[in-house]
Amino acid sequence: MSLLNERYSTYEEFESERKKTDKRLEFIDGVIYMTPSPSIKHQEISSYLHGELYNLLKGSKCKVFAAPTDVVFNNESKDEKKTVVPDLFVVCNQGNFTENEYIGAPDFIIEILSPSNKSHDMITKLNLYMNFGVKEYWIVDPMENRIMVYFLDQDGEIQFTLVNLGEIVTSNHFKEFKINTNELFNLS
């Protein structure tokens, strides 16, 4: 994960930068981040999870989307926007889409770690997602063969579960979504 520029930017400057490049850019707290191209292992895991979610949600009101689809978190009371490009996200409210982005908090987000984006996904995005009410957030770590699951309980409190290789991870929001970590981390 690299910073496109180290100075603080406005959302308008971010939009201007985005029009000049085909790279994936994110905007959080006045900083523009450039997301590097993912590894093959990253893409295998993303494809696997996308397929499993697609099959589970087929015919329901919920849909799964993959990068490079933008998600915009808009805090109107503070007149601030934050734009991210999650690896995968699920939404059940189709009314929040514009032609090119989803505005609001998805129900479920999955990020797959790469060596270059670990702290961004584990700190910056975790705080952003939980603060904006994402119901569940999985951080898939193919280097450590584990999944960190964060979710909001019925009281709106953040809960955490660590799932290691050899275990089954089950979504707290979509109870039928279960992944065998042995299959997930041994796709090649």
Image: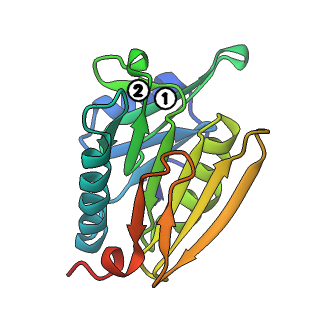
Q: Is 42 in front, or is 171?
A: 171
Q: Measured from the top left, where is residue 105 in percent x and y?
A: 54, 31
Q: Is 144 in front, or is 180?
A: 180
Q: Is 64 in front, or is 180?
A: 180
- In the rendered image, the vertical position of residue 1 relative to residue 79, given as above or below: below
Quarter of the image with the N terminus in it: bottom left
Q: Earlier in the sequence, mark 1 or mark 2?
A: 1
Measure the C-alpha gap from mark 1 to mark 2.
Answer: 6 Å
Q: Check contact, mark 1 vs mark 2: CB within 8 A.
A: yes
106 on left or right of 40: right
Q: Which residue is mark 2?
A: 102
Q: Which residue is mark 1?
A: 72
Q: Is 14 in front, or is 53?
A: 53
Instruction: Label 1: state its secondary structure.
Output: strand
Instruction: Label 2: state its secondary structure.
Output: strand
Is disc 1 surrounded by few (<14), some (14 to 19) or many (20+) residues within 10 Å?
Answer: many
Is disc 2 surrounded by few (<14), some (14 to 19) or many (20+) residues within 10 Å?
Answer: many
Picture residue at 31% right of the left edge, 47% below the top: 56
Picture residue at 31% right of the left edge, 68% below the top: 42
Q: Mark 2: which amino acid?
A: Tyr
144 on left or right of 162: left
- In the rendered image, the vertical position of residue 59 relative to residue 167, given as above or below: above
State which quadrant residue 120 falls in.
Answer: bottom right
Q: Mark 1: which amino acid?
A: Val
